Amino acid sequence: MSKDKSEAAEPKKKGGMKKLLTITVGAVALIGAGVGAGLYFGVGMAHEAPKPEDHYPKLVVRDPAAEPAAKGEGEEAAAPKVGTVSVPNDKFKVDPRKYEITYYPITQAFTTNLADGSGFLQIGISLSTYYDGKVIANIERQDVPIRSAVLMVLAEQDPALLSTSHGKQSLQRQLTAAINQVLRDKEGFGGIDNVYFTSLVIQ
């Protein structure tokens, strides 16, 4: 009788061990699959990691229906424009018919002695950009080095050349290049399309 009981218990033990072994193998397989999937998606995400250019300003697409509203006294400045079109770099040729332009006036005028020491030059400028509010924020953040770069360009000017329209256009190009260079050095992105004179006095 006792012999029969021990024989019956032995198959039960073997069946329990098989069941435990199956569960353990299944758990290990699930863990392995989870780790594999994690590594696979982790590698995929590594390729999707944000690049510095993802944080660069973007072009603002022009809305033909939107008319620029005249800003009255006491009104707050419009919210910074948000761009949607990424470009390879800030030297990308922009089609002015497709993108919105923003003008940013530099509030303080620039005054410097002229290169030949014969007098001084005082100018007021406004900057234009087709990019979003990030460029304006960059200009405001880099105000001091931008002012320095502008003054250095102005100090090299020949008053005789500045009296001609060709000389003024050349100065516009030089100032645009100098400001963009400061922004590229400090922020990694230029974005200034042109510099416009709001006042220009040579004495």
Image (tube, rainbow, N blue to C red):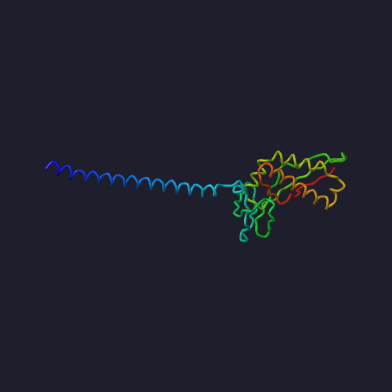
Where residue 199 appears, as percent x and y from the top left, is 77, 47
Q: Quadrant of residue 111?
A: top right
* Residue beneath the point at 41% across and 46% down: 32
The location of residue 5, given as percent across then percent down, is: 15, 43
> As drawn, is 124 to the left or to the right of 71?
right
Q: Is residue 98 above or below residue 71?
A: below
Of 42 and 80, nearer the camera is: 42
| Residue farthest toward the front in the current orientation of the protein | 3
Can the viewer see residue 75 in this picture? no
Q: Is residue 84 above or below residue 111?
A: below
Quadrant for residue 141, please give it: top right
Task: Say which quadrant the C terminus sits in.
Answer: top right
Residue 50, given in percent of the width and then of the height, sits at: 56, 47
Which one is in front, 200 or 173? 173
Task: Give the left or right position of residue 46, taking residue 122 as reference.
Answer: left
Judge by depth and name the residue closer to the eye, 38 or 76.
38
Residue 43 in view, yes or no: yes
Residue 171 location, x and y as percent? 79, 48
View extreme (left): residue: 1
Q: Is residue 25 left or right of residue 106?
A: left
User: Left of 38 or right of it: where is 150?
Assistant: right
> Quarter of the image containing the N terminus?
top left
Q: Nearer the viewer, residue 30 or 160?
A: 30
Q: How many marks?
A: 0
- Identify the residue shown where x is 63% and y is 49%: 57
